[in-house]
Amino acid sequence: MFESSKSIVLDRIFNELPGLHRTNESTDYGFERSILPKSQKRYLQRLSGFQNFAISRDFAHYILGTIKPEMHTLETGSGVSTLAFALAGSTHIAVSPHSDETERILNYARSVSIDLSRATFTNAPSEQYLPTMDRLDLDAILIDGKHAFPWPMIDWFYTADMLKVGGILMLDDIQLRPVAVIRDFMKQDRARWKLEQTIERTAIFRKVGAPILDVAWHEHPWTVHWKRPFMEWARGRIKRHLGI
């Protein structure tokens, strides 16, 4: 499929917005426990059937233009992003717990002639699967699975060290605080990450250094510079220890 044809297919997906997703991330499909304002809660309660909580159109086109067939990629979550990775042609893993969601993606892909032969769907919760998976050398990661705290952090923790230096890590839904925390941390950790751009609600980072996990807390600017009173306490403790 020519690049222009792939772009046309991607635009068709956004014009159709097929219902791929359940209405709720949790297994409790009611919204009784939600603490959203009443108007937003009523909106969610009115949703029926399957929805499409897609990445933005511009970000989908970024994936199509950036990801190459020789790349190895992984995402937590699945949906339109999975179709974009498939159109780009990478060897791809989508970690999503719902097999019915996978089936809807497969059926829709067939209807628009998208080849998913290089995509692997792992129907398990990311917090269960990622710690057990074989270590990979990944070229790109998209974190867009469960958005409740602390799942974005869990997904980041188990995947960021597998990303090659020079690879890209993409955080979708940075308007949500559990994702924004990771974005803010990575923006300050310039020894390891460079914020390349933000496309609507998606932050795109380039990995510029390693390791990611084998570091001390005082190597992270996000931790050290959080509150000056803490650093004053730390300096006082060190001076007392050294007797100066």
Image (cartoon, grey):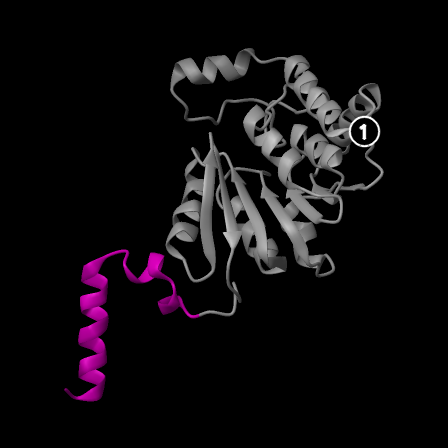
For the question of whether residue 18 can be seen, the reply is: no
Q: Position of residue 42 (x, y in %)?
A: 47, 13
Res 26 → quadrant: top right
Q: Is residue 243 magenta?
A: yes
Q: Is residue 221 magenta?
A: yes
Work out which quarter of the rendered image holds the C terminus and state it: bottom left
Above or below, comparing residue 212 to residue 54 in the picture: below
Above or below, comparing residue 154 to residue 241 in the picture: above
According to the picture, the residue beneath numbered tag 1 turns out to be 1
Q: Secondary structure at mark 1?
A: loop
Res 52 → quadrant: top right
Say few, some or many: other residues with alpha carbon within 10 Å of mark 1 (under 14 / 14 to 19 / 20 or more): few
Work out which quarter of the rendered image holds the N terminus and state it: top right
- Which residue: 81% across, 41% down? 118
Q: Position of residue 214 (x, y in %)?
A: 51, 70
In this view, the residue in front, 85 or 183, is 85
For the question of whether residue 81 can be seen, the reply is: yes
Q: Tell me the kind of residue under disc 1.
A: Met
- Which residue: 59% across, 26% down? 24
Above or below, comparing residue 15 to residue 154 in the picture: above
Residue farthest to the bottom?
Answer: 243
Res 144 → quadrant: top right
Q: Position of residue 31 (x, y in %)?
A: 52, 22
Magenta span of residues? 216-244
In the image, 232: left or right of 46? left
- Which residue: 55% across, 43% down? 170
